[in-house]
Each structure stands twice: as C-alpha cells, then as structure tokens.
Image (cartoon, helix red, strand yellow):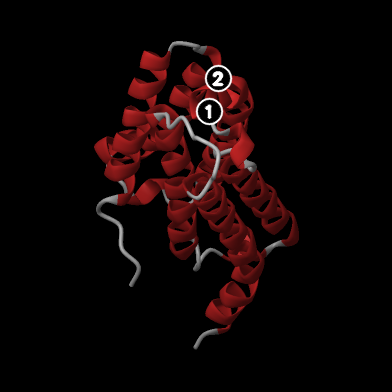
C-alpha cells in the first residue's frame, strides 16, 4: 500500500463520520414519520427532495474515491474546505425531512423549509464547482473539447438548477428541477466505478 493511499484512508475518516450522520439523519427522520402515531400527510415532492439529499450524500462518498490520488486533497486548507462542504451536505440531509413526527404535514414542511433547503443545496453546489475547477485545472490537457464541455456542464448545471429552485415557488418547477437534478446525477455518475 502506498503512503498516498494510507494518507487518503486517514483523511476519509472524518468524511465518513459526516456522511454517516447525514444518512442516519434522513433514515431516522423517515422512520419517525413512518412510525408516527399521529397522521402523516405524505407529499411526493418532499420525499423526492429527501431522496435527492440522500443520493447527494452517496455520490459525494463515491466522489471521494475519485480524488484519492490528488495530493492537494491532503493539504490542511483544502481538507478544511472539504470538511466545510461535507458539513453543508449534512445540513442538507438534516433539513430534508422534519425531525419530529408532529410536523407530519410534509407538504407544509416543504413549503416552510424550501428556501433553507435550497440555500444549502446551492451553497453545496457552489463549493462543488469550486472544487471541480480546482481539480480540473491540472487535468484539462487530457480531455478533448467535447469532453471538457460535458464535464463543465455536469459541474455547473446542478448549481444553475439549484439557484432556480431557490428562487421558484412553483411546485411544478420544483418537480421538474428535481427530475433534472437526478438526470444530471445519473449522467455524471452512471459510467463511474470504484476500482
């Protein structure tokens, strides 16, 4: 095992904690709603947003593997920026569903919480774009123009959609935006693998 891999394994420990907390928060909130003795008014839009938060957590764990060979990820300030990014990711997960089953009207919860949720997602996507640009600067020469356009589209599109969803109140726009975010995620991560 190379020293870089050992350093990567050490560095991912804190990321694993934040990701584990994010998954646990979504699972616990959903479990409390599902087992609530009070009636719950389920809302597909709220559940789809929570599913997007969960998928975002999973793909970021997946993304960590892709940056394992970049020595820059192990410098203090960049590592600190990644911790901040994963902390925002935890907040997204925590905001995706109500903590108490007494907030069992998920449609009303989404309406009250929409702005906060999408501010967090927009902040996260901005951080992701900055990280992507940081990594891409050393890799640009390896890719064709078409591939670069695709890479930058996949980096910037979620940020643009998140900004639209932050500003929009229409539930139809939120449904369409979430479908688009899932499509971008599938396009971005579909061909990837951990090996």
Left or right, 84 with reference to 24: right
Q: Position of residue 174 (x, y in %)?
A: 41, 20
Q: Position of residue 118 (x, y in %)?
A: 56, 27
Name the residue: 49% across, 34% down: 40
Within 10 Å of disc 2 (Cα), the crowding (few <14, some 14-19, many 20+) is few
Nearest to the observer: residue 136 or residue 115 = 115
Instruction: Mark 2 and mark 1 in contact? Answer it, CB < 8 Å.
Output: no
The image shows a total of numbered marks equal to 2
Name the residue: 42% across, 29% down: 43
Relative to 141, say whether 39 is above or below. Answer: above
Residue 157 occupies quadrant = top left
Name the residue: 42% across, 43% down: 51
Relative to 88, say whether 181 is above or below. Answer: above
Nearest to the observer: residue 147 or residue 94 = 94
Whether residue 156 is visible, yes or no, is no
Give the farthest residue toward the bottom: 1
Whether residue 69 is visible, yes or no, is yes
Q: Which residue is mark 2?
A: 111
Residue 82 is marked as none
Left or right, 192 with reference to 7: left
Q: Which residue is mark 1?
A: 105
Q: Position of residue 52 (x, y in %)?
A: 43, 40
Q: Disc 1 on helix, strand or loop?
A: loop
Q: Disc 2 on helix, strand or loop?
A: helix
Q: Which tag, 2 or 1, sits closer to the chain's start?
A: 1
Nearest to the observer: residue 140 or residue 40 = 40
Distance CA(mark 2)–CA(mark 1): 10 Å
Give the farthest residue toward the front: 37
Q: Nearer the viewer, mark 2 or mark 1?
A: 1
Residue 167 occupies quadrant = top right
Within 10 Å of disc 1 (Cα), the crowding (few <14, some 14-19, many 20+) is some
């Amino acid at each position: 095992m190379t020293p870089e891999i050992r350093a990567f394994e050490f560095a991912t420990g804190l990321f694993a904690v934040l990701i584990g907390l994010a998954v646990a928060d979504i699972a616990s909130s959903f479990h409390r709603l599902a087992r609530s003795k009070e009636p719950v008014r389920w809302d597909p839009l709220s559940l789809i947003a929570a599913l997007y938060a969960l998928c975002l957590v999973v793909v970021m764990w997946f993304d960590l593997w892709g940056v394992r060979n970049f020595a820059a990820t192990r410098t203090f300030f960049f590592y600190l920026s990644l911790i901040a990014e994963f902390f925002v990711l935890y907040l997204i997960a925590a905001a995706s569903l109500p903590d108490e089953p007494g907030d069992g009207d998920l449609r009303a919860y989404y309406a009250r919480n929409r702005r906060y949720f999408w501010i967090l997602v927009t902040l996260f996507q901005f951080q992701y774009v900055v990280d992507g640009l940081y990594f891409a600067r050393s890799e640009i020469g390896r890719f064709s123009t078409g591939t670069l356009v695709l890479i930058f589209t996949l980096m910037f599109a979620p940020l643009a959609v998140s900004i639209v969803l932050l500003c929009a109140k229409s539930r139809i726009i939120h449904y369409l935006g979430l479908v688009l975010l899932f499509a971008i995620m599938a396009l971005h991560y579909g061909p990837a693998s951990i090996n």
